[in-house]
Image (cartoon, rainbow, N blue to C red):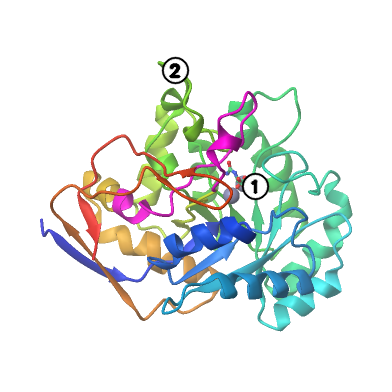
């Protein structure tokens, strides 16, 4: 096995960049490795209109350090008041690459999300017509459903009915965490994709809860049993076109993570590529890393793959900071729990 691999420069198909001081601090960690990213719209207030997405895009580009290149792929936050014509115009101008559905209350900054899915029918039909993908945070919020079952129940109760009711709608199941989601995705046509995070390939629910509670491993959807992690690893390393990387790198300050009721999200941007190389090597699938990080995503979104390259080399232990400093306070970097050996050159 060679100790150096060169792949097409990767993209991140699910990323939280936040705004203001946090944006300035985290953006270089993504831009260093990734050429493009689907930027999540769950700011406070959310990015709902095309005009808001254009302004957010400008703030991202203004925060990019000199000499770095990075293309933010903008998304709109779907609300029950979203105007289909505004969505269509934002897509036609090339600004917006996807619309994001958060069930109201499902995750960080989702209060403005959708409660009544009938109220967004018009937008979804317009999106199917124009070929604009819908990215879904796939968890029900019904308090009677156990948190570890929320993704599987969402597939039956929400995702499948919406897809049946809206033929032609392209859907991305975001940050899938279960074998149920892997199985569902595999049974569909090429109008369905699924992103998989770095951390869900590494941790299961024991890592969060056994032997002490580890808030930095708490994200939503929450990590599941080991059998689900193994299903995700098999899917990610399969090379199958429908599975691609969405890191869901989701920075929160330590002050907001380490609370009696702490925020959900893992910050993986700085070390994601090193972790992924290790995961793919362990699965004897290094030759399929490029499909997962650099080829399948653009193909789903109808975009060209990047022309730039990235080389990773295996060698001495790779160091990365335990946290990064931001003007709002430190943000802890995801600790995979093992020594990293693959360095991005
Ligand atoms: N994944 C998370 O746990 N958190 C994300 C929101 C999300 O992607 O659901 C965040 O914005 O912090
Ligand atoms: Zn989410
Ligand atoms: Zn996310």
Q: Which residue is mark 2?
A: 212
Q: Residue furthest top?
A: 211
Picture quadrant where residue 286 is located: bottom left
**Vertical side of 319 occupied by 221: above or below:** above
At 74% from the left edge and 53% from the top edge, which residue is drawn?
A: 44
Give above or below for 324 relative to 301. above
Disc 2: residue Cβ within 8 A of ligand 1's nearest atom: no
Does mark 1 have its CB less than 8 Å from ligand 2? yes
The reply to whether the C-beta atoms of the residues labelled 1 and 2 are less than 8 Å apart is no
Q: Nearer the viewer, residue 50 or 200?
A: 50
Q: Determine if residue 275 is in view.
A: yes
Q: Which mark is residue 98?
A: none
User: Considering the numbered disc 1 on the image, is that residue within a helix, a strand or a loop?
Assistant: loop
Numbered-mark total: 2
| Residue underneath mark 1 | 137
Q: Give the extent of the magenta segment.
A: 251-276
Q: Could you tell me residue 110's position as x and y percent? A: 74, 45
Viewer-proximal residue among 212 and 235: 212
Percent across and percent down for residue 274 are 29, 53
Q: Position of residue 241 (x, y in %)?
A: 43, 62
Left or right side of 330 for 129: right
The quadrant of the picture occupied by the C terminus is bottom left
Q: Which image quadrant for residue 2? A: bottom left
Front residue of 304/189: it is: 304
Q: Mark 2 falls on what kind of element? A: loop
The residue lying at 77 percent from left, 58 percent from top is 78
Of circles 1 and 2, which is in front?
Answer: 2
């Amino acid at each position: 096995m060679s100790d150096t691999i060169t792949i097409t420069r990767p993209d991140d198909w699910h990323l939280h960049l936040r705004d203001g001081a946090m944006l300035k601090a985290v953006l270089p960690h993504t831009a260093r490795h990734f050429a493009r990213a689907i930027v999540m719209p769950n700011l406070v207030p959310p990015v709902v209109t095309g005009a808001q997405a254009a302004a957010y895009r400008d703030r991202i580009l203004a925060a990019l350090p000199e000499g770095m290149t990075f293309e933010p792929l903008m998304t709109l936050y779907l609300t029950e008041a979203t105007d289909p014509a505004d969505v269509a115009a934002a897509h036609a101008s090339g600004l917006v690459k996807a619309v994001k559905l958060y069930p109201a209350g499902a995750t960080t900054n989702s209060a403005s999300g959708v409660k009544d899915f009938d109220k967004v029918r018009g937008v979804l039909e317009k999106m199917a017509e124009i070929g604009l993908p819908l990215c879904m945070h796939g968890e029900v919020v019904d308090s009677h459903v156990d948190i570890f079952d929320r993704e599987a129940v969402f597939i039956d109760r929400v995702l499948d009915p919406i897809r049946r009711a809206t033929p032609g709608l392209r859907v991305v199941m975001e940050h899938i965490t279960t074998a149920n989601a892997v199985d569902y995705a595999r049974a569909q046509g090429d109008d369905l994709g699924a992103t998989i995070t770095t951390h869900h390939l590494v941790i299961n629910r024991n890592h969060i809860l056994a032997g002490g509670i580890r808030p930095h491993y708490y994200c939503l959807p929450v990590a599941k049993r080991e059998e689900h992690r193994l299903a995700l690893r098999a899917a990610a390393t399969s090379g199958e076109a429908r599975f691609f990387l969405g890191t869901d790198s989701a920075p929160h300050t330590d002050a907001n993570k380490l609370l009696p009721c702490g925020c959900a999200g893992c910050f993986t941007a700085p070390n994601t590529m090193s972790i992924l190389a290790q995961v793919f090597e362990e699965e004897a699938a290094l030759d399929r890393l490029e499909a997962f990080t650099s080829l399948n995503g653009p193909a789903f979104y109808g975009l060209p793959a990047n022309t730039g390259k990235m080389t990773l080399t295996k060698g001495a232990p790779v160091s990365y900071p335990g946290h990064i400093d931001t003007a709002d306070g430190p943000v802890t970097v995801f600790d995979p729990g093992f020594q990293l050996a693959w360095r991005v050159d």
